Amino acid sequence: MKAMVTGHRPQGLNQAQRIYINAVLPAIVEELVKDYRVGTLLSGMAQGVDLIWAGIARQSSLQLEAYIPFPDQTKGWDTEWVNYREGLMDYASFIHQASNSYATWAFHKRNDMMLDDCDVVVAVWDPRRRWGGTASVVGKARERGKPLVVVDLEKWSISDNFSTHPILGT
């Protein structure tokens, strides 16, 4: 099974949220592996939550599939982020690309590709932010009835819809 992540970029997170994310994401992955046999993590390879998720794949020796919107996604990034991402790209088993060049729609297409390919969605999201890629993925995951884990950055809580989902529920 495959689990994807969606979440905010570093500039959309405060220090407390970063600490919380770094604590809960490895535990979520561990539970998904143990209870639901997830063996592959899908990442959009953006700064922030995406790269944390990809790093967990490598640290946990799970398969990583990288989904990039276009080849020069890192244009304008700090060198530290670029180098970290490149190491994770080298680790990835597969690289999926939405477009050959920059386009705003390529970010959404990349997210849709991950939604199509995943069995479970993990969203690190502040639900007060009702715009942007993370909110869009959460809405689409709910519309499609995908198993969804939400790390709520407003309430500092984790919820899922697994108990009512026919694939993962009881």
Image: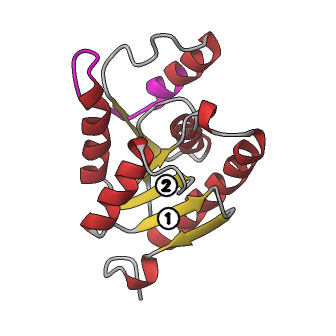
Q: Residues within 10 Å of mark 1 (few under 14, many from 20)?
A: some
Determine which residue is flagged by label 2.
123
Measure the alpha-carbon separation of dots 1 and 2.
Answer: 6 Å
Give the mark, 1 or 2, whose residue is nearer the N terminus. Answer: 2
Amino acid found under the numbered disc labelled 2: Ala
**Snapshot quadrant of residue 43:** top left
Determine which residue is flagged by label 1.
149
Q: Is residue 1 visible?
A: no
Q: Secondary structure at mark 2?
A: strand
Q: Is residue 116 visible?
A: yes
Q: Residue at x 24, y 52 (%)?
A: 116
- Is 68 magenta? The answer is no
Judge left or right: residue 14 versus residue 170: right
- Is 99 magenta? The answer is yes
| Number of numbered tags placed on the structure image | 2
Q: Is residue 167 above or below residue 54?
A: below
